[in-house]
Amino acid sequence: PSVLDSLPLPSAPMPARWRFEMQQCSSEASLNIAPSAQADLLYLSVSFQRRYILITFLCAVPSTAASYTDSSDDETSPRDKQQKNSKGNGDFCIKNIKQADFGRREIEIAEQEMPALMALRKRAQGEKPLAGAKVVGCTHITAQTAVLMETLSALGAQCRWAACNIYSTQNEVAAALAEGGFSVFAWKGESEDDFWWCIDRCVNVEGWQPNMILDDGGDLTHWIYKKYPNMFKKIKGIVEESVTGVHRLYQLSKAGKLCVPAMNVNDSVTKQKFDNLYCCRESILDGLKRTTDVMFGGKQVVVCGYGEVGKGCCAALKAMGSIVYVTEIDPICALQACMDGFRLVKLNEVIRQVDIVITCTGNKNVVVREYLDRMKNGCIVCNMGHSNTEIDVASLRTPELTWERVRSQVDHVIWPDGKRIVLLAEGRLLNLSCSTVPTFVLSITATTQALALIELYNAPEGRYKQDVYLLPKKMDEYVASLHLPTFDAHLTELSDEQAKYLGLNKNGPFKPNYYRYGSTSTHLSGDTLWHPA
């Protein structure tokens, strides 16, 4: 192992990823390698050179930002383990607390690309604007989210956290947070039952009751409404960052069932224009490459939905030489797609010919069994929207279809005639389940979430009613300004005469609330099912 540790591998240290068993006989030796679920052995050669054993191998690591997780050979469910951190605290449930040091290094790397959160932590740490806040959160648990959680803690908040996606948790980061004293209940590869159990452990704890909610997808909010409605008597507000969760909040508000003010972070300019657009423009290619090694040039791709996520996906695929079709229900977004050079179609018009199907609507039943049956052999199917209901995966779990696990997060679904489709992440979010997302973009979203929590928590009584609100424009501009120094960017300042001419304050806000910076924002209509993200 000491020799193997020194090998210049591009992934994690060898003993954390592989188990070696050597058996030596009189004239020969055998080598058994048991890779983790996240690595595929492509080539192996063993030879003997005098007193040394030369092992040559090539492995592929197709999975996630958390590509170093699940490295333990212990298959025991975290729910059946009793773990404690170095301080003796056991109020958490994660995969393996021993991965904490590695997770800490990942968090430190993320901090370098999250300048606004670090600046906010430095500026507001003395004031403690979240002193007394008890934040319960349900988001992706990654190195970037960890920076947000530690920032909230530095600003005075107590935090309990669960994952909003069963595949996106970085186990080593969850370990680092648990070691740091955070109550985290999440691990990569949770079952549906585990998912709701983790949320319940965050909420249902003796002697601790949340007064703020930070949600991504609405599942945490739904669980509290369903199981612990009396908690809303002490909750000051909800901050929600996904289109699916925001839609559900608007449904509650319309029905008169929203008990507390809610901040719609998803439709803030900094979230829409940066996280949704620029993040997905980069991560769609990363996710597809890591899972399928597909070449994009000449491939026919249909992107379902032309909101900010769809725009980012289409732009990236077009730049790589793909032939891109778009489906859309909104005539304004549809016209934008046409003006951007994409052909607007109905899904049934192209489903037989396309090589890749990407959903990014936030809706349900976008790709149903009828379309899946008509897809060509080898068609890649994936989801970039938050909701895991866009692709009707349940309809594929029937006796006549065979599921074949190819690698982590990649399944072949095989029809009786031999046709197969390639399903990624079982229809859940592709980029956070199968690849990475740009840390800098997540800094923008995380800073927006932090400011929304501060605003709702400190707002005087009566400022916000039991309704859904957008982040004040001034805060959007402040988030953007915190990121400009990274680019050595210098803003032009209005003169007094210019400010008077435009009717603006020299310090902003510079645009009215209805100004959308060239984008449109739409909300879904109709009934939507609650789901585990």
Image (cartoon, rainbow, N blue to C red):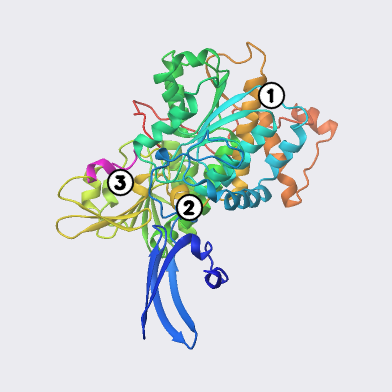
One can see residue 424 in this view: yes
Estimate the spatial distance between the alpha carbons at disc 3 and disc 1, rounded to whole Å. Answer: 51 Å
Camera-nearest residue between 49 and 199: 49
- Quick one: 188 or 311, which is closer to the camera? 188
Does the magenta run of residues contain 392? Answer: yes
Mark 2: amino acid: Thr
Mark 3 or mark 2: name the one nearer the start of the chain.
2
Residue under the point 46% across and 25% down: 221
Q: Quadrant of residue 271?
A: top right
From the image, tell me which residue sits under label 2. 69
Q: Amino acid at mark 3?
A: Leu
Q: In terms of image quadrants, where is residue 513?
A: top right
Q: Is residue 156 left or right of residue 279?
A: right
| CA distance separating discs 3 and 2 | 37 Å
What crowding class fits label 3: few (fewer than 14 Cα within 10 Å), some (14-19), or many (20 or more)?
many
The tag on residue 347 is 3
Amino acid type, label 1: Ala
Query: In the figure, 199 relative to 94: above or below?
Result: above
Expressed as whole percent of the image width and height from the top left, the position of residue 161 reads: 52, 33
Task: Look at the image and give the residue range highlighted in magenta.
Answer: 389-396
Instruction: Tell me residue 365's x, y (percent).
Output: 30, 38
Vertical position of residue 178 compared to residue 253: above or below: below
How crowded pointer 2 is (Cα within 10 Å; few <14, some 14-19, many 20+) is rated as many
The disc, 3 or 1, on the residue closer to the chain's N-terminal end is: 1
Mark 1 surroundings within 10 Å by alpha-carbon count, few (fewer than 14), some (14 through 19), many (20 or more): some
- Is residue 517 at all visible to an observer of this figure? no
